[in-house]
Image: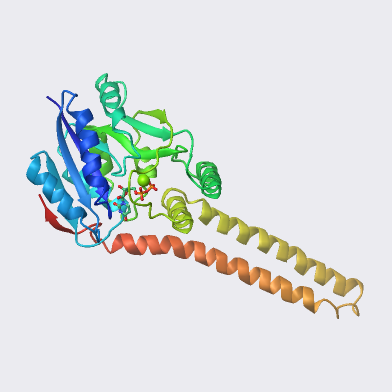
């Protein structure tokens, strides 16, 4: 019998954990697989860990990893993937926004051997603020223009993968982890199942629009070097324009030597404009250097306090 590892990152989810387990168990018990749950407690401040311990006592298929502090969902995912021993691995949110009813179909599709990964894609965003949906549409359009790695719009992290693909994902030990990009970068054949948005069963999403915006910027700098080229291009264009300006001043001096006492206001604007562009370009370069800095320090991506 195949083993299916179910990876569930949790942050302050005491209410959702038992609901999640019951819902998934109901589906999994009807499948001919051996389940292996990996709950990852990402430094929760509530009783999430207690809930996990209780489930572990009740069902020997349930395991958990508890972090020493909050490391973020991406770190939680990685810890789960590191620990998983299954032939197939599925990544799920604990808030039941990833419907467990998809599991049998995902497993079946993978078994046919035609695909290495079955992902899910939201086709609508009911229950989400309009601004948020608009910004995220813009983000997908933009990142796909400037990155060679395809980022599928609306794709969730909810996906089932073969062992081969999981090993490929695990071979990427980058510090700054943008899963949507990583899953796509490793290649393999992915099929997307469409589904309608489901609201979370309990608790609240911790993602503010500002955090999502920062996450988007991180995704761009992780999977595209276009901002660096942008800096190069703005630099080149402004220097080309300044050469024209210099020529203009020299020629004017020769043609009419007395006409050069005007335009200090325009000069100040130009200086400010160029100063702004320079800072922007340095900032872009700095952003990438910051990433290099974090990467070369080789800090662990997460620290485990308890694992069972
Ligand atoms: N999560 C986590 N660490 C964090 C934030 C979230 O492990 O720092 C987990 C959370 O418990 C949930 C999943 O990641 O299982 C998705 O989080 P959420 O529902 O808040 O995000 P959304 O569904 O709005 O994208
Ligand atoms: Mg959610």
Q: Residue at x 31, y 40 (%)?
A: 96
- Please tell me in which quadrant of the rendered image residue 194 appears: top left
Q: Residue at x 60, y 56 (%)?
A: 233
- Please tell me in which quadrant of the rendered image residue 192 appears: top left
- Please tell me in which quadrant of the rendered image residue 305 appears: bottom left
> Can the viewer see residue 180 in this picture?
yes
- Of all residues shown, which one is farthest toward the top? 112
Residue 4 image position (x, y, % from top left): 18, 32
Q: Nearer the viewer, residue 228 or 92?
A: 92
Residue 48 image position (x, y, % from top left): 21, 53
> Can the viewer see residue 174 in this picture?
no
Eyeballing the image, is 86 above or below 72? above
Q: In which quarter of the image is the N terminus?
A: top left
Eyeballing the image, is 151 above or below 14? above
Eyeballing the image, is 166 above or below 2? below
Residue 254 image position (x, y, % from top left): 87, 73
129 sits left or right of 37 in the view: right
Q: Nearer the viewer, residue 133 or 240?
A: 133
Residue 106 image position (x, y, % from top left): 29, 26
119 sits left or right of 104 in the view: right
């Amino acid at each position: 019998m195949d083993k299916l590892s179910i990876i569930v990152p949790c942050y302050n989810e005491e209410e959702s954990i038992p609901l999640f387990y019951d819902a998934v168990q109901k589906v999994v018990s009807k499948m001919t697989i051996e389940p292996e749950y990996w709950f990852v407690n990402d430094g929760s401040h509530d009783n999430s860990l207690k809930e996990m311990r209780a489930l572990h006592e009740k069902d020997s298929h349930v395991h958990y990893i508890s972090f020493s502090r909050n490391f973020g969902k991406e770190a939680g995912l990685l810890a789960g993937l590191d620990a998983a021993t299954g032939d197939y691995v599925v990544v799920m949110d604990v808030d039941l926004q990833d419907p467990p009813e998809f599991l049998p179909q995902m497993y079946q599709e993978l078994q046919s051997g035609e695909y290495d990964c079955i992902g899910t894609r939201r086709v609508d965003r009911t229950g989400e603020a309009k601004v948020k949906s608009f910004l995220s549409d813009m983000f997908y359009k933009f990142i796909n223009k400037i990155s060679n790695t395809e980022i599928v719009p609306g794709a969730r992290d909810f996906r089932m993968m073969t062992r081969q693909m999981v090993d490929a994902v695990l071979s990427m030990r980058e510090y700054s982890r943008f899963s949507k990009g990583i899953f796509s970068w490793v290649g393999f054949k992915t099929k997307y199942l469409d589904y309608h948005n489901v609201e979370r069963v309990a608790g609240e999403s911790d993602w503010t629009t500002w955090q999502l915006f920062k996450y988007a910027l991180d995704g761009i700098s992780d999977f595209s070097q276009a901002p660096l080229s942008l800096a190069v291009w703005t630099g080149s264009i402004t220097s080309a324009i300044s050469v024209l300006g210099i020529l203009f001043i020299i020629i004017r001096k020769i043609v009419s030597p007395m006409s050069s006492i005007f335009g200090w206001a325009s000069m100040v604007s130009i200086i400010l404009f160029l100063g702004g562009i320079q800072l922007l370009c340095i900032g872009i370069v700095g952003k990438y250097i910051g990433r290099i800095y974090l990467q070369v320090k080789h800090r662990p991506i997460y620290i485990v306090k308890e694992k069972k």
